[in-house]
Image (cartoon, rainbow, N blue to C red):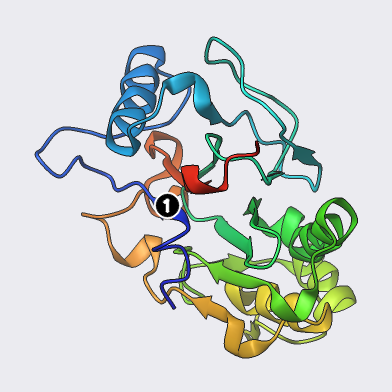
């Protein structure tokens, strides 16, 4: 389902640049972060100021973006962004959490969300569907959604509070219980179930099977590497042919 091939660009950065060198969007190192932003801008042939991203609180707040600024700056407090404007690159940061890409082919609107377990059980996937309906008149059955690379179920063990939170949303979907009362959690499966509950058609949802914790030469993984883990950036942008006149 290469649904953005003719209508824009979408993807996620890798641990290393194709020609070599670290590609790390973690904000703890300003030099590396600035380099990473500039590298993405160069590859997308945009200005760094056209990239919209920020510190994510692991919540469900979604920002509608209508324009960019003259200089790059971080828009903090959001875990999702949406726009119908060309020339804007929506970006979210990941190191196991789920990137969720949305495209409305009728209204040429896009969305991007970051789903850790808190945002997942709080329903950020469904909230993005609702927000696109509200802002652009999107129809759930027409939306195209990509659930991007994230941590594997086997690599993500959770305790009772997380288990109970998940059960409240999608029952036992994505939960593999263990004898000690813990469970292995499949974040992608829960997002998929929420999207289906919201009316998104299964055939319009693609699940990336690559797992961050199982591909150490490709992705960062917080669960595998701890605090030293870097961050990837997921992005999505519309083609210039959809620029508003």
Residue placed farthest to the front in the image? 245
In the picture of the structure, the residue carrying the numbered disc 1 is 9
Residue 131 percent across, percent down from the top left: 84, 55
- Tag 1, which secondary structure? strand
> How many residues crowd around disc 1 within 10 Å: few (fewer than 14), some, or many (20 or more)?
some
In front here: 71 or 222?
71
State which quadrant residue 166 falls in. bottom right
Instruction: Specify whether 21 is left or right of 112.
Output: left
Residue 64 percent across, percent down from the top left: 77, 39
For the C terminus, the image quarter is top right
Residue 120 percent across, percent down from the top left: 73, 62
**In the depicted structure, whether residue 230 falls above or below residue 100:** above
Residue for point 27% across, 45% down:
15
**In the depicted structure, whether residue 118 falls above or below residue 28:** below
In front here: 16 or 179?
16
Instruction: Specify whether 79 is left or right of 229.
Output: right
Instruction: Specify whether 212 is left or right of 60.
Output: left
State which quadrant residue 20 falls in. top left
How many badges with numbers are in the image? 1
Is residue 71 something one can see in this rendering?
yes
For the N terminus, the image quarter is bottom left
Residue for point 68% across, 72% down:
143
Instruction: Specify whether 52 is left or right of 229.
Output: right
Residue 14 percent across, percent down from the top left: 29, 48
Is residue 185 something one can see in this rendering?
no
Residue for point 62% across, 84% down:
178
Residue for point 21% across, 54% down:
217
In front here: 109 or 228?
109
**In the depicted structure, whether residue 214 falls above or below residue 236:** below
Residue placed farthest to the left in the image? 19
């Amino acid at each position: 389902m290469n649904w953005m091939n003719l209508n824009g660009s979408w993807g996620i950065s890798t641990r290393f640049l194709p020609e070599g060198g670290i590609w790390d969007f973690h904000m703890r190192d300003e030099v590396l972060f600035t380099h990473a932003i500039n590298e993405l801008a160069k590859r997308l042939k945009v200005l760094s100021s056209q990239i919209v991203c920020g510190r994510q609180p692991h919540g469900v707040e979604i920002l509608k973006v209508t324009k960019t600024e003259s200089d790059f700056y971080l828009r903090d407090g959001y875990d999702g962004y949406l726009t119908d404007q060309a020339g804007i690159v929506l970006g979210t940061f990941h190191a196991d959490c789920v990137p969720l890409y949305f495209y409305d082919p009728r209204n040429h609107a896009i969305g991007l969300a970051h789903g850790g377990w808190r945002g997942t059980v709080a329903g950020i996937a469904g909230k993005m569907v609702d927000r696109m309906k509200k802002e652009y008149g999107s129809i759930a059955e027409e939306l195209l959604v990509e659930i991007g690379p994230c941590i594997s179920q086997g690599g993500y063990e959770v305790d009772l509070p997380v288990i109970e939170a998940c059960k409240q949303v999608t029952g036992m979907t994505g939960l593999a219980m263990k004898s000690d009362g813990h469970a292995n959690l499949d974040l992608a499966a829960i997002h998929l179930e929420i999207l289906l509950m919201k009316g998104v058609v299964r055939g319009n949802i693609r699940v990336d099977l690559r797992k961050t914790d199982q591909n150490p030469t490709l992705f960062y993984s917080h669960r595998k590497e701890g605090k030293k883990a870097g961050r990837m950036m997921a992005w999505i942008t519309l083609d210039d042919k959809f620029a508003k006149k």
